[in-house]
Amino acid sequence: MSTSVTSAAHLRSLERDPIQLGDRPVPVRLHILDTMRVVEAALVRCADDIAAAAQRAPIARPVACKANGSTYRSLREARIAHQDRQRQVQLALADQRDPRRWKYTGQRTASYAALWLLARVERVPGPCRRITEAEEARIGKVAAGAADRIERALDIAARKKRAWASRCSTRWTGFTLV
């Protein structure tokens, strides 16, 4: 048991030996990381643009006094106005904090942007108008570009083509895809 402890300690000391400094393999595949960043930037930029065009502005918070500056005629009228303002404030806060609203700060990840864009395409109710055909086409183009980029980075596209070619040549048509 003492030999394994000393050999483990010796291995740890070799891992941290300053003599071993120099070129080391990167623990992350950089082309995958670059692809992740490019896809995330494209999806977030598309969500920003679609939200700027389709998302309505949040409900404004009401002012605390009467518009013309006069006083209320009765205490009942003042209470009704106060309760009405409280309801308006609650609605404004709820609208600002609506999770279906695209935010320009905070959680801006590729998966969140993709889900938000998917909700717009599927016409999920929210603080947005229906997107136009041009906006839907743009979302489709960005999504297709992201999928293509991911497939190329992970080398899935070549495997799909090979699998598709083998199926076509053997099962269905007898033709081979080029």
Image (cartoon, rainbow, N blue to C red):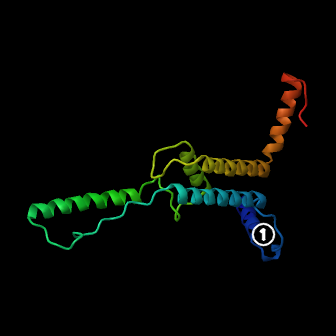
Where in the figure is residue 94, as x and y percent of width and height? 36, 56
- Judged left or right of residue 82, residue 18 is right
User: Looking at the image, which residue sits at the far bottom?
Assistant: 18
Q: Residue at x 30, y 65 (%)?
A: 62
- Judged left or right of residue 15, residue 176 is right
Q: Secondary structure at mark 1?
A: helix
- Judged left or right of residue 116, residue 178 is right
* Front residue (pair 62, 97): 62
Q: Amino acid at mark 1?
A: Leu
Q: Residue at x 45, y 52 (%)?
A: 127
Where in the figure is residue 5, as x and y percent of width and height? 70, 61
* Front residue (pair 16, 29): 29
Camera sees residue 3: no
Whether 127 is drawn above or below 78: the answer is: above
Whether 4 is drawn above or below 166: the answer is: below
Whether 125 is drawn above or below 167: the answer is: below
Where in the figure is residue 17, as x and y percent of width and height? 77, 74
The residue to which callout 1 is attached is: 14
